[in-house]
């Protein structure tokens, strides 16, 4: 399995492979940058179709975390870990204990938190083996599941996008198509519903769809069709790659503002979005609420006031990206990358 010649290898400082046969642990920890501080980013627990697919995810997600943390002006570098979901039965406690020991061997180079498939309870198990973990459910600086803060940041940034396009952030006349009703996606739907938006939702979980219908008045659509709906706003909140050469031509929404990481299948998708009159809010800026929440826990002194200040800054950054992109005639991704890359330069 090639690493240095991998298409998504971006001069990562380190890529670490960990295995523990007794617990069925197979993990990849990718550290992209520690220029701004220890590499921080969540752990994803997923059923990958191959080891190569897991490596691709780790490389792409870790680079995105460097950009996310830099764009949010956090004292953290970028890293990400993926755990390959075992085949057959396994002991979850043993697996996450083994993973905690693997993190500890890195001596603080990488600090983890929740991502897809991982809970605060899993973080507590990891914490039994290492101190390099955040998103804990208990402790002096514990902040718990960062998902609600991620959703809050996405909601605020989305409203900035709505103001930019329609001149007002009133959502009462807007239809929003949401792909993925996990912790972040559902919390975002609750905020959109409270703001008066009409919801079209898609997920593979029947129970959460029923809940959205009953509690939020949402209309369910098929996952493969959510992007083609007649909606004002499209929110990809599942896994990456939702914006690709096949889906973008069929998107009717004028604004894409979702919580998923790596929504663009590649940077080459940006011109296609532009040609189709679609405004894209760069995901690594928009979905930084969770890592903002984690950052103050990592500092050891959780502060809701500090988190709020950073969320205000997130919304302001989205507004700046939209304004500068218009003024300079460039894409929103180019502006967002510029902000992050300027902050990632070594002194």
Image (cartoon, helix red, strand yellow):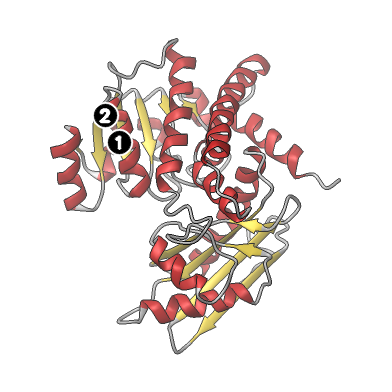
Q: Which residue is mark 1?
A: 189
State yes or no: discs 1 and 2 in contact (Cβ < 8 Å). Answer: yes
The image shows residue 80 at horizontal and vertical percentages of 57, 59
Q: Which of these two is toward me, 270 or 286?
A: 286
In this orientation, which residue lies closer to the viewer: 2 or 180? 180
What residue sits 28% from the left and 38% below the top?
A: 226
Rounded to the nearest angstrom, the CA distance separating label 1 from label 2 is 6 Å
Is residue 218 in view from this perspective?
no
Viewer-nearest residue: 280 or 35: 35
Q: Secondary structure at mark 2?
A: helix
Residue 210's place in the image compared with 176, above or below, is below
Which residue is located at x 45 percent, y 28 percent?
156
- Residue furthest right as drawn: 347
Residue in front for this viewpoint, 336 or 301 = 301
- Asked whether, in this view, residue 109 is left or right of residue 214, the answer is right
Q: Secondary structure at mark 1?
A: helix
Give me the residue at 67% from left, 42% from top. 70
- Residue that sits furthest to the top in the current view: 167
Q: Which mark is residue 57?
A: none
Question: Tag 1: Cα neighbours inside 10 Å, few (<14), some, or many (≥20)?
Answer: many
Question: Taking 125 as reference, is 270 left or right?
Answer: right
- x and y percentages locating residue 305 in the rendered image: 54, 36
Q: Which mark is residue 193?
A: 2
The reply to whether residue 33 is visible in this rendering is yes
Image quadrant where one finds the N terminus: bottom right
Expressed as whole percent of the image width and height from the top left, the position of residue 25 reads 47, 79
In the displayed structure image, the side of residue 218 where residue 92 appears, left or right: right
């Amino acid at each position: 399995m090639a690493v240095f010649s991998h298409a998504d290898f971006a001069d990562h400082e380190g890529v670490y492979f960990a295995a523990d046969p007794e617990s069925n642990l197979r993990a990849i920890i990718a550290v992209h940058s520690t220029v701004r501080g220890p590499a921080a980013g969540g752990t994803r627990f997923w059923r990958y179709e191959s080891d190569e697919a897991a490596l691709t995810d780790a490389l792409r997600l870790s680079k995105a975390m460097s950009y996310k943390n830099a764009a949010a002006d956090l004292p953290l570098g970028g890293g990400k870990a993926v755990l390959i979901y075992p085949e057959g039965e396994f002991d979850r406690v043993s697996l996450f204990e083994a993973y905690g020991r693997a993190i500890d061997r890195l001596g603080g180079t990488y600090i983890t938190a929740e991502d897809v498939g991982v809970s605060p309870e899993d973080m507590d198990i990891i914490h039994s083996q290492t101190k390099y973990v955040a998103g804990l459910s208990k402790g002096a600086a514990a902040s718990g599941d960062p998902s609600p803060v991620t959703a809050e940041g996405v909601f605020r940034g989305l409203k900035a996008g709505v103001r930019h396009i329609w001149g007002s952030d009133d959502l009462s006349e807007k239809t929003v198509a949401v792909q993925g009703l996990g912790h972040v996606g559902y919390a975002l739907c609750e905020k959109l519903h409270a703001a008066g938006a009409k919801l079209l939702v898609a997920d593979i979980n029947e129970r959460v769809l029923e809940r959205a219908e009953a509690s939020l008045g949402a209309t369910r659509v098929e996952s493969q069709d959510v992007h083609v709906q007649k909606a004002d706003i499209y929110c990809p909140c599942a896994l990456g790659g939702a914006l690709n050469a096949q889906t973008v031509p069929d998107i009717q929404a004028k604004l894409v503002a979702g919580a998923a990481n790596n929504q663009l299948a590649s940077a080459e998708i940006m011109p296609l979005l532009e040609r189709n009159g679609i405004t894209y809010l760069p995901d690594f800026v928009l979905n930084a609420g969770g890592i903002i929440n984690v950052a103050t826990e990592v500092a050891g002194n959780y502060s809701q006031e500090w988190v709020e200040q950073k969320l205000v800054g997130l919304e302001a950054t989205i507004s700046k990206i939209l304004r500068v992109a218009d003024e300079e005639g460039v894409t929103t991704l180019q502006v967002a990358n510029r902000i992050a890359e300027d902050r990632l330069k070594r002194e």
